[in-house]
Amino acid sequence: MTTQTATQKSSSRFAQYWTLTKPRVTQLAVFCAVIGMFLATDTLPDMWTVLAATVGIWLLAGAAFAVNCILEGEIDARMARTARRATASGELTRTQTIVFSLVIGGIGAAVLYRLVNPLTMWLTLATFLGYAIIYTLILKPATPQNIVIGGLSGAMPPALGWAAIANEVPMQAWLLVLIIFVWTPPHFWALAMYRRDDYARSGLPMLPVTHGMNFTGFHVWLYSIALAATTLLPFVVKMSGLIYLVSAVILNAVFLWHGWRVYKHYSDLVARKAFTWSIIYLSLLFAALLVDHYIKF
């Protein structure tokens, strides 16, 4: 074997393990956790703690997603969107994936426990075990409301970040969790709608498959309205000021427009745009919270 071939194989294997951690999903989760860290204090947080918490949360999230890939290997193999995952194609064995998950999860837990605080470690561990086990094994194959009920795990990152700095999780942190919890259904159902054939092949009881496209589109619209109301709560409880309020109103106007189009003017392109906007929306909304936190009007 030439040096170049060995390097290519090594690079390919690294990419396979990296993909198991679902990096795009992890990045958004960690971003929301970091925002929680900065909102937890009136001054700048200790940056070493921020760095340690970011690394620990990232590693534990990646470990949970790797476990998810193991548990859903057969399902992933039936879906075009996920068939290339190494666990679905058989390029990585269950043993290799389990060892990888245990290693990065163990490092992540140790970092949080030793360099941050035990509360953050236990909350993060419970959050991502809840995602990997309760959501993946129990809820996802059992009910079309899986993403609603199981959405709490995906909504927890701001609370994890808050706990990392304050060593507690007050009402303000739970408001951020609530926002992501309500955001999750319209975000995910937009994806499920334009990937409905994939989910039909998977055998999972996703809402567009079990209840139809119009029913799902109506619920995307309802949750969009609920989200718009929920995102005003930080201003109502005086957690944020005018910068956040104006930003939330503008962002919600666009989100509502996308939700209405998904409901009344559906096409796969409309759903794709709604899904893409939902990710941008959440990032901008939390960024607005951060800016408002340090620049008060």
Image: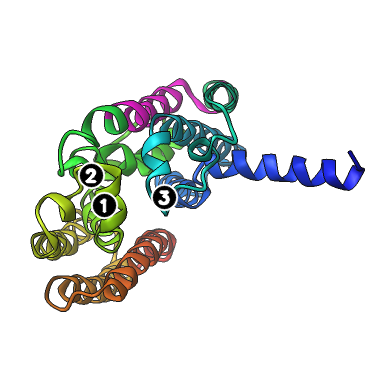
Q: CA distance from mark 1 to mark 3?
A: 13 Å
- What residue is disc 1 on? 184
Q: Quadrant of residue 208?
A: bottom left
Of the two numbered discs 2 and 3 in the rendering, the one whose residue sits closer to the viewer: 2
- What residue is disc 3 on? 32
Q: CA distance from mark 2 to mark 3?
A: 19 Å
Disc 2: CA contacts within 10 A as few (<14), some (14-19) or many (>=20)? many
**Residue 122 magenta:** yes
Tell me: residue 86, above or below residue 297. above
Q: Nearer the viewer, residue 83 or 11?
A: 83
Residue lying at 50% horizontally and 50% vertically, measured from the top left: 27
Residue lying at 42% horizontally and 59% vertically, measured from the top left: 290
Indicate which disc, 2 or 1, sits on the residue closer to the N terminus: 2
Tell me: residue 269, above or below residue 173. below
Residue lying at 24% horizontally and 50% vertically, measured from the top left: 200
Q: Quadrant of residue 130?
A: top left
Q: Nearer the viewer, residue 230 or 44?
A: 230
User: Which residues fall within the magenta stretch?
Assistant: 114-134
Identify residue type, mark 3: Cys
- Contact between marks 1 and 3 (CB within 8 A): the answer is no
Identify residue type, mark 1: Thr
Number of disc labels: 3
Indicate which disc, 1 or 3, sits on the residue closer to the N terminus: 3
Q: Quadrant of residue 55?
A: top right
- Percent across and percent down for residue 3 are 91, 43
Residue 85 visible to an observer of this rendering: yes
Q: Is residue 281 left or right of residue 90?
A: left
- Marker disc for residue 147: 2
Q: Nearer the viewer, residue 263 or 181?
A: 263
The residue tagged with tag 2: helix, strand or loop? helix
Residue lying at 58% horizontally and 32% vertically, measured from the top left: 92
